[in-house]
Image (cartoon, coloured by chain):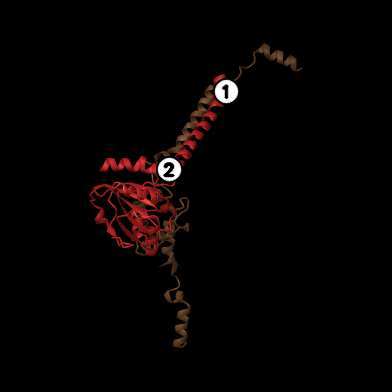
Chain colours: A brown, B red
């Protein structure tokens, strides 16, 4: 291959020139493994603009900027937990799609158990209040019933 | 079935519906008078000083850094705005009124072109004593700003005491902002 053709190939295939396994997302170049880690972090963070979307899924400008910050930190080797802390420091625990257990969220996490206990009490009281089953028929009554049904 | 149980059976669902209705009514009424915003988030900056930043001025005004608001002579407001933001335009009369009453307001233009900022201030008035430009929006991220406008109340020791996301209205000023000025001045 001539030097000219090699140059052309390099120009046409910048991906090849960089090494095939790099991806570019939101303007940041990173390896697929790094991108996967960045996505895992972004999936756990709430977009502050459209509050029911994750940062990964949102098309808001702020979400894009936060995706860039996540990827830059991933490339620098910052651990996931530290990236999450970076976001919580700025936006509070609301930014976490899965809020941590804290005094503020105790009631939230306890609610299924509270419902279970309330349900248990409801059933228990319901049973207790139910009238006792009818007493079995006496011999005379049984005889009368047999007579009638004959 | 005893009469009491029968009454309970009818009464409990009715009570739930009435309580739910009253709750929804309260939420909707408070939303209408700007007393409640379901999207508003509490700011983690409250009780702290703003993070370090240095921003250049825009529209001929002086910019500022975090060190400039570490010990203001009196409590002040920092207002994040942008020329492209409609609620910002809506709150301009309120900001003008606050500035006229002697309150110090410094502005930060969020992700805005200098020309657009200048046009906006010429059109809607300039209540700001200093105006900084956060063109990249990175300082905004450090402050936890998630939309414009946002207004921060900073006390004499430079600590953020209150953050309001959204346009300031008379209701918000009367019920929240004025008590803060009385408390911290």
The mark that comes first in sequence, 1 or 2, is: 1
Name the chain under label 1: B
Q: Is residue A81 visible?
A: no
- Mark 1 Cα-neighbour bin, 10 Å: few <14, some 14–19, many ≥20: few
Task: Please say if B84 is above or below B99.
Answer: below
In which quadrant will I find the N terminus of chain B?
top right
Horizontal and vertical percent for residue B141?
Answer: 36, 56
Residue sitting at x 45%, y 76%:
A14
Is B28 or B115 nearer to us in this picture? B115
Q: Which residue is mark 2?
A: B34
**CA separation in Å, label 1 and label 2:** 43 Å
1 and 2 marks on the same chain: yes
- Provide the secondary structure element on which disc 2 rests: loop
Horizontal and vertical percent for residue A23?
Answer: 45, 68
Is B171 or B22 nearer to us in this picture? B171
Is B176 or B39 nearer to us in this picture? B176
Numbered-mark total: 2
Name the chain under label 2: B
Residue farthest along the bottom direction in this orientation: A2
- Provide the secondary structure element on which disc 1 rests: helix
Q: Is residue B64 visible?
A: yes
Q: Which residue is mark 1?
A: B6
Horizontal and vertical percent for residue A87?
Answer: 37, 54
- Mark 2 Cα-neighbour bin, 10 Å: few <14, some 14–19, many ≥20: some
């Amino acid at each position: 291959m001539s030097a000219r053709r090699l140059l052309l190939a390099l120009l046409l295939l910048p991906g090849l020139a960089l090494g095939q396994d790099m991806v570019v997302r939101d303007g940041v170049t990173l390896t697929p493994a790094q991108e996967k880690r960045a996505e895992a972090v972004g999936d756990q963070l709430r977009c502050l603009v459209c509050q029911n979307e994750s940062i990964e899924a949102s098309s808001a400008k702020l979400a894009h900027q936060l995706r860039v910050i996540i990827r830059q930190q991933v490339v620098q080797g910052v651990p996931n937990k530290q990236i999450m802390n970076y976001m919580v420091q700025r936006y509070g625990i609301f930014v976490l799609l899965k809020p941590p257990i804290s005094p503020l969220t105790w009631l939230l996490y306890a609610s299924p158990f509270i419902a279970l206990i309330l349900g248990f009490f409801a059933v228990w009281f319901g049973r207790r209040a139910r009238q006792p089953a009818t007493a079995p028929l006496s011999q005379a009554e049984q005889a009368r019933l047999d007579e009638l049904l004959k | 079935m005893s009469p009491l149980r029968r009454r309970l059976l009818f009464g409990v669902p009715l009570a739930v519906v009435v309580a739910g209705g009253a709750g929804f009514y309260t939420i909707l009424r408070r939303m209408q008078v700007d007393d409640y915003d379901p999207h508003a988030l509490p700011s983690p900056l409250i009780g702290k000083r703003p993070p370090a930043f240095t921003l250049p001025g825009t529209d001929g005004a002086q910019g500022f850094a975090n060190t400039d608001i570490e010990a203001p002579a009196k409590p002040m407001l920092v207002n994040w705005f942008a020329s492209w933001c409609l609620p910002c335009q809506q709150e301009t009369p309120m900001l003008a009124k606050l500035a006229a009453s002697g309150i110090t307001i410094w502005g930060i233009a969020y992700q805005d072109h200098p020309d657009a900022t200048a046009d906006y201030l010429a059109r809607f008035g300039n209540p700001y004593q200093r105006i900084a430009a956060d063109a990249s929006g990175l300082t905004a991220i450090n402050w936890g700003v998630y939309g414009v406008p946002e207004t921060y109340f900073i006390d004499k020791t430079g600590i953020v005491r209150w953050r309001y996301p959204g346009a300031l209205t008379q209701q918000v000023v009367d019920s929240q902002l004025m008590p803060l000025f009385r408390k911290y001045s």
